[in-house]
Image (cartoon, coloured by chain):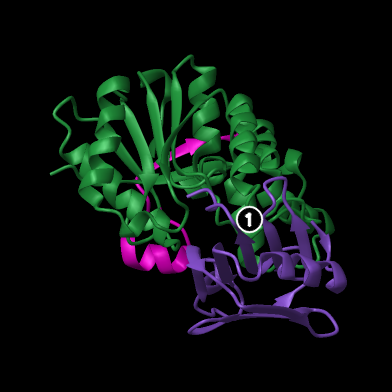
Chain colours: A purple, B green
Amino acid sequence: MGPIDPQTVQVELERRVGRDLFMHLETTTGSYTLLGPEKRPPVIAFVRNAPIHPERGSITGPGPYRVGLKLPGGWVYAEGLTDFEVSVRDELLLAGHDAEGNLTIALQLSTQPFRE
Amino acid sequence: MNRVELVTKPIDHLTEGLDEFVPANERHLLVVLPHPDDESFAAGGTMARCADANVPVTFLCGTYGDMGRRMGSPFFATRESMRDVRVSELREACRVLGATPRWLGLRDRTVEFEDPHDVAARIRDHLDELSPSTVITFFPGHAVHPDHDALGHATHLAVRTWAGGRPNLLAVAVGDRADIRAKLGPPHVYCDVRSVVERKLGALAAHRSQTEMMFQRWERGDEDDEQTRTFREEMLVLERYYRLPLD
C-alpha cells in the first residue's frame, strides 16, 4: 500500500463500476480512546461484504481524498483517504492513515467476497 | 528508569497482601483472550514463568485481531493482510514465551454479539482436552475493550459450567489503576515476572504491527505521562490478577 495516485484510482474505480461488488467500509478511532488524555468515547463503524452495484464512481480532493459511489438507490461516501493498493486478489483497497500510521478509514471494493 | 534498575527494585510495596502465583504448582496454564498481543501484555510473564517450570502453556486466542487499527509504524499491513500478519506475529510471540497458540476463529470486534453460551461451549471443548489447573482471562466488565469483556464473560461461564474440574480462574482488569481499585478492590494474586522480563519484551516486540509505535515512544520517552510510566514499570516487574468466583 502506498500514497494514492488519483488518476490510477479513478481508472480502478471505473473498472468496477456497473458490476456486482462486495464492499468493506470502515471508520475507527480505535478502542482505547477512553484511556487517552481526552477520555473520548470510541467511535467505530464497519460494514463488511455489503453487496453494491455502483453506477458511477469518482475520487476527488487535493489529498487526503474523497470517494463517492453513486448507487441505483443511494450513495457510498468516504473522506480522508490517503493510501491505496490493488491486492493480488484484484481487490481495490483504499485507506486513510493518521500521522502515526494508524488506520482511520477504509473503503474496499472487490468482485469476490472479502474473507469473512 | 532503565530495565536493570527496574528488575532489581523491590516490589514488596506492590505485592503486600497478595498471594504469589507459583508455576511449580501448575499442571497446565490456559490463557483465553481475544486478540493476538493481549497474552503478552496481560500474562506474558506468567506464561514464560510456567514454561520455565516445564508447565505446558496454551493461548486460546479468540479472534485474529483482523480489525486492528495499528498497521505498524510506518504502516505495512492492510485491512486484508492484517489477519495473516497477526497470526504469524502471534506464532513468534508464543515461541518466545514457550506457549502453544490455538484459535477460536471469531471476528475481531464481534465477540459480544455472539451467543455467549455458544462461545462458552467451544471454550469448554478446550478445557476438556487440556484440563488446565489455571485459566487466565479478562475481568468481564472491567477490561475496556468490548471483546475483552465478552470473552472474559464467556470464559467465566465456560469454567463455571465445566464438569471436568475446578481450575483457578484468574482475571486481568484493564484501565485506570485508581478507578479499578475503587471498583474491585486490590487484586488477589501476583506473578513476579522480573526473571523473564526480556522474553516478555521479546514477545511484545514480536507483535510488531501493534507494538512498534509503543516501543518507539518508549525510546523517545517524550510522550509519556505519569500513568503510562507507572503502567510500563509495573508491567515489567509483575502481573496481577483477580480470582473470579466459580459459584
Q: Nearer the viewer, residue B236 or B64?
A: B64
Quadrant in the picture for residue A20: bottom right
The answer to whether A6 is drawn above or below residue B87 in the figure is below
| Residue ID at (66%, 42%) | B85
Could you tell whether B77 is left or right of B114 in the image? right
Q: Is residue B240 above or below residue B28?
A: below
Foreground residue among A29 and B188? A29
- Residue B77 location in percent, x, y? 71, 51
Instruction: Residue at 68% x, 77% y: name it.
Output: A57
Which element is circle 1 on? Answer: loop
| Magenta residue span | B173-195
User: Quick check: can you spot residue A79?
Assistant: no
Nearer the observer, A116 or B140? A116
Q: Residue B102: in sight, yes or no?
A: yes
Crowdedness of circle 1 by 10 Å Cα count: few (<14), some, many (20+)? Answer: many
Instruction: Indicate the chain on which mark 1 is placed.
Output: B
**Residue annotated with mark 1:** B79
